[in-house]
Image (spheres, rainbow, N blue to C red):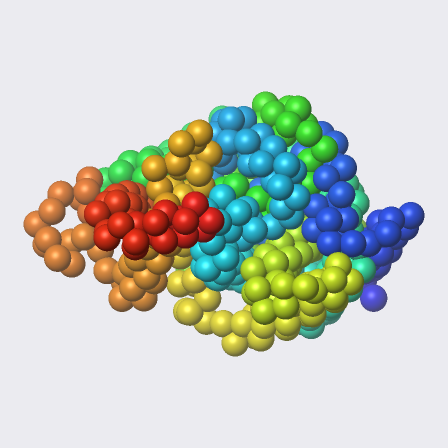
Amino acid sequence: MNSALLIILLFLLFSLYLGIRAKRGKEMNMEQFAVGGRGFGTLFIFLLIAGEVYTTFTFLGGSGWAYSKGAAAYYVPAYIFLAYVLSYWLAPKVWRYAKDHNIISQPDFFASKYNSRVLGIIVAIVGSMALVPYIVIQFKGLGIIVGEASYGAIPPLAASIIGAVVVTIYVMVSGIHGSAWTALIKDFMILAIVIFLGIYIPFHYFGGIQPMFENIQAVKPEMLTLSTEGLSPAWFISTVLLNALGFYLLPNSFVVVLSANGEKSIRKNAITLPLYTLLLLFVFFIGFAAVLKIPGLQGADGDLSLLRLAIQTFDPWMIGLIGAAGLLTALVPASVMLMAASVGLTKSFYNVLVPQATEKQQLRVSKLFILLISCAALVLTVTGGEALAMLNIMSYSLVTQLAPSLFFSLFRKNVVNKYGAGAGIIISVLLVLYVTAKEIKISTFLPHIPHVINDISLGFIALIINVIVMLAVSFITRALAVTSTPLEGVENSSFLKREG
């Protein structure tokens, strides 16, 4: 066993120990399992939300995008910064309502706001559709990281399976508490590894960060600017807006907000997290350095740029530490995703079928959902090809379609009713699925349309259609209720008052 593999194994076992031990001294019920009894302070909220930023997709994909796409990679920190700004006002309102109404899942929030269990089920389905691909990405990324960092001693598939088993065990035992404690070690490791690599590699190979970019400017100047079409400024702006609106609507981010011990903790994080996100620039520096030092990686192999350059640069023990940090970037986000998806499905589906279910029954069903989702994600990890890539592209476009209904629900007088909210979500989600599956662009219908319009994210266009449909259906259904016969009007008025 080489030193790299030994270090990775030790961190894996330590993560399992921390995850299981997190349950100690706590009587596990649904509130403790899902939102930590709403007792997490500023530090744990910081670590859990930061955990959603530093995933394997960022660790591998951030450097990979810098390597393959150049300046387009900067959309990632841009949308995260904007999401944190929005969260300063948005997240405390969500937390306050959830606490007042004893809500512990995203579907329950929508169901309560619109007094509609059907809408809660729709939200649970959309959230799960967006989350499963991300769980698969964590498992796949974990396999790649461990496979590369162990110098091939552990095949990627075996690493994915082992990681999935570990994260499934500790999240079933400790819920979000396990995620919080493993996030503690993960974020300190990422902080050290990313800063070290992002500074050392440019100085080691080029004499500094500025000389590195000067070398790239001389050899591949197109890497340092956005394209005139495709990944253009229009794509950049629309994608940043779309992802920023959807960041806290991913079920895992949403449930982290609900776990806070107060609005003050949430606002403190909205202020401090953008500084932590700046560390993504160091990940990009590694990808840019690899452009010149590891040339020739094509397509998805660009995601290997960080690991390949590190292996070329450092001794095995250092590769072990890098691999361990990468391992934790998979385990922590995957655990929160599994927990959030399972609790959402339990509260929306199971509680509708069994409304009198006890806390223990709900907890058991949530753990069963964790097992089922983890197994499904593993199957997709093994078999997922182009369909997985397509789902990844769709994830943010899908979950952001929940944003209009959420935002309108926070107004003192909501002009949207449950029919409008449901119609807007369903039509926009179906539109996203269709145009992504068929690889349709605006130019498919309007061949001569300018690139500045054609490059706009179709998810963002679906969002605009969502708002139009939502408002129109809400207006029409309210108008029909008012113009109905007197008897029908009384019945409808009573129904609307009860159902929202």
Q: State how many labels appear.
A: 0
Q: In this view of the protein, can residue 203 be seen by the observer?
A: no
Residue at coordinates 32% horizontally, 39% vertically from top-left? 238
In the depicted view, which residue is nearer to us: 322 or 221? 322
Instruction: Tell me where residue 231 sits by quadrant.
Output: top left
Image position of 88 with respect to 472: above or below: above
Q: Quadrant of the N terminus?
A: bottom right
Q: Find residue 19 and report its horizontal and vertical position in percent.
A: 81, 53
Residue at coordinates 72% horizontally, 39% vertically from top-left? 38
Q: Find residue 156 and report its horizontal and vertical position in percent.
A: 64, 68
Image position of 415 with respect to 492: above or below: above
Q: In this view of the protein, can residue 426 be seen by the observer?
A: yes
Q: Is residue 241 left or right of residue 147?
A: left
Q: Residue furthest front?
A: 487
Residue at coordinates 61% horizontally, 58% vertically from top-left? 347
Q: Find residue 282 and report its horizontal and vertical position in percent.
A: 57, 35
Q: Find residue 421 and report its horizontal and vertical position in percent.
A: 37, 49
In the depicted view, which residue is nearer to us: 211 or 442? 442
Residue at coordinates 70% horizontally, 64% vertically from top-left? 357
Q: Is residue 356 left or right of residue 376?
A: right
Image position of 381 with respect to 185: above or below: below
In the depicted view, which residue is nearer to us: 340 or 329? 340
Q: Is residue 359 left or right of residue 246?
A: right
Q: Residue furthest right?
A: 25
Q: Residue furthest left?
A: 448
